[in-house]
Amino acid sequence: MSDYSPYRIVDIAALPAEPGWLLQQPQPVIAVGQGATANADVVVVERAAADALVAGIERNPRAALVLVQVLRAIERLPLESALDLESMAYATLQAGAEHRTWLAAREDAPQLVAGGEGPAVLVSREGDVVFAQLNRSASRNSLSVEMRDALVELFELVLLDASIERVELSARGACFSVGGELREFGLAPDSAAAHYVRSVRSPGRLLSRCAARVHCHVHSACLGSGMELPAFAGRLSAEPRSFFQLPELGMGLIPGAGGCVSISRRIGRQRTAWLVLSGRKINAARALEWGLIDSIAERG
């Protein structure tokens, strides 16, 4: 197989032990076999288990390459620098052909999605505890610009007010969040402007700075940024029927709400890569086993 094919599948026993070998590979490396190795982006036990990964890579090979390059690099970076790198990589893909193809396939032009009953995030306080709930159940709590700005205000408040000892973040409606509001994708004037906005108005970046005071409880669907954001919380619990999925590769993108960082720092880069490249869901039990969540509990 050419070194420049979209992916490389190697028996785990045949991988070189040389430190840094993986960083030289210009494609995702899938190791097959039992055991652990640092020189692979994903490890699967059997060859058949690589099929879903290969399918994702072949559909959007550039996004797949950018994903594994980011995950490799951020292991050695401080959190803030890792978020910068993720955002710049995301901006690169926003301007790329794979994402443009996905945008062009939509029937409707991009549009801002705002409005609903009450504020996008309901906030109340009892003593030293702040309770916050995502409040756009009609759109399944998608992370719209309106929702993003409300979350930015919430975490800015927490960072400014040391008397807030704990934040309890959850969501109203049928699920925690289906992730980014897809109807708004394509609204940014250019990818550099989008990177700027992610740098100065990122809920995940702010949450990471007060994570020790934040408990997030999720339920049902936690997709894309609806999985990326709660992964920053110091404590993350989920209802038994919750499930988690990262579908961004199918859009020619990678997780861009901080998930390459927040999720990989919980479950490692190889499992994060598996989630993105396969696009498959995991349930609450698997999420707990992997360390993505800290506990399983019903809503109080």
Image (cartoon, rainbow, N blue to C red):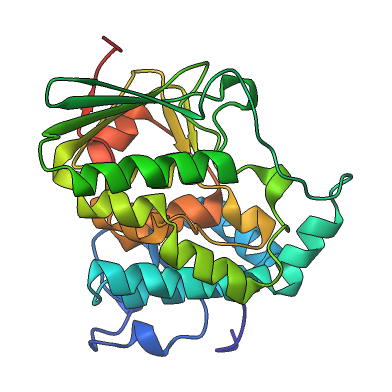
Place residue 238 in its image quadrant.
top left
Q: Is residue 211 above or below residue 133?
A: below
Residue 203 in view of the camera: yes
Place residue 217 in its image quadrant.
top left
Residue 170, image x and y in percent? 36, 25
Residue 278, image x and y in percent? 54, 51
Place residue 186 in its image quadrant.
bottom right
Is 83 on the left-hand or right-hand side of 110? left
Tell me what residue is drawn at x 77 percent, y 66 percent.
100
Quarter the C terminus occupies: top left
Residue 93, image x and y in percent? 62, 71
Q: Is residue 223 above or below residue 25?
A: above
Quarter the N terminus occupies: bottom right
Q: Is residue 296 above or below residue 39?
A: above
**Along the line of sight, which residue is nearer the eye, 204 or 227?**
204
Tell me what residue is drawn at x 42 percent, y 56 percent.
202
Q: Is residue 221 above or below residue 145?
A: above
Tell me what residue is drawn at x 55 percent, y 89 percent.
3
Residue furthest top in the image:
300
Is 155 on the left-hand or right-hand side of 199? left
Residue 81, image x and y in percent? 31, 74
Residue 10 in view of the camera: no
Is 35 on the left-hand or right-hand side of 242? left
Residue furthest right in the image:
107
Total marks drawn?
0
